[in-house]
């Protein structure tokens, strides 16, 4: 959905277009019609006139499997994925599966599970959990703190190789020590024949 600022800018652009292309007798009514539209009506108008095409939200595409992601885990209501522009190594987003959905109990459970997993696998000093809204989803950032990172810290674009490496490290099963079979020592006296010279 368009923000209020986007809607205002688009209305200004359409009004300029009306001034330069519409017949004089229709300009005022067209401008009046555009100015009274709310954000939803304006977006619908733009779609109907093929000015914008309806796009699926990035997170909805990830949830549906249409877009690539680096999935750590999921439950009924949320999915945990690696942030592709992380603040620190292992930065994970918890994204509700339904668009515009806020955090639920299952989302919080997944957040706790992933935070514990990061502590165990990546050994950060601390874990920062920070809710925010992005593309209409109430997401949760889980950021491993190695130095003094905050939610405002600089992000970097992670390469697919970096993301694969972090994913592998987080999802790697702990190595179980190989148990050697115990050998029983027999404490019997062996009888050997006497040697004859």
Image: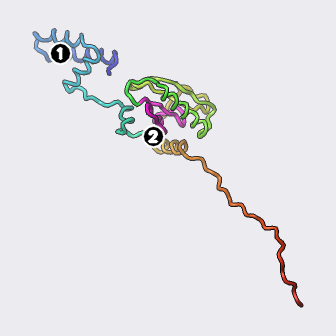
Q: Quadrant of residue 184?
A: bottom right
Mark 2 Cα-neighbour bin, 10 Å: few <14, some 14–19, many ≥20 = some
Mark 1 Cα-neighbour bin, 10 Å: few <14, some 14–19, many ≥20 = some
Give the SS element for disc 1.
helix
Question: Residue 113: x, y in percent?
Answer: 55, 34
Q: Is residue 184 above or below residue 196?
A: above
Whole-angstrom CA distance, mark 1 to mark 2, is: 46 Å
Question: Residue 116: x, y in percent?
Answer: 58, 34
Q: Which residues are magenta?
A: 72-96
Quadrant, the C terminus: bottom right
| Sequence-earlier tag: 1 or 2 | 1
Question: Residue 132: x, y in percent?
Answer: 47, 23
Check residue 113 in the rendering and tell me which mark sits there, or answer none. Answer: none
Image point (25%, 18%), residue name: 42
Image point (43%, 23%), residue name: 102
Magenta segment includes 99: no
Give the SS element for disc 2.
loop
Residue beneath disc 2? 70
Check residue 18 in the rendering and tell me which mark sits there, or answer none. Answer: 1
Magenta segment includes 93: yes
Q: How is the image coloured?
A: rainbow
Q: Is residue 32 above or below residue 174?
A: above
């Amino acid at each position: 959905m368009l923000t209020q600022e986007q809607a205002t800018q688009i209305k200004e652009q359409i009004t300029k277009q009306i001034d330069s292309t519409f017949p004089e007798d229709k300009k005022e009514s067209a401008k009046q019609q555009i100015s009274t539209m709310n954000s939803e009506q304006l977006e619908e108008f733009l779609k109907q006139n093929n000015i914008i095409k309806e796009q699926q939200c990035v997170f909805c595409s990830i949830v549906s499997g249409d877009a690539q992601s680096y999935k750590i885990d999921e439950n009924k209501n949320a999915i945990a994925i690696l942030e592709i522009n992380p603040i620190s190594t292992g930065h994970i987003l918890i994204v509700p599966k339904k668009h515009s959905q806020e955090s639920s109990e299952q989302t919080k459970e997944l957040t706790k599970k992933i935070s514990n997993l990061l502590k165990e696998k990546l050994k950060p000093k601390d874990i920062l959990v920070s809710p925010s809204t992005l593309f209409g989803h109430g997401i949760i950032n889980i950021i491993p703190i190695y130095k003094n990172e905050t939610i405002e810290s600089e992000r970097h674009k992670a390469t697919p190789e970096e993301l694969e490496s972090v994913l592998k490290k987080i999802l790697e099963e702990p190595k179980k020590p190989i148990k050697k079979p115990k050998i029983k020592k027999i404490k019997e006296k062996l009888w050997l024949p006497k040697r004859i010279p």
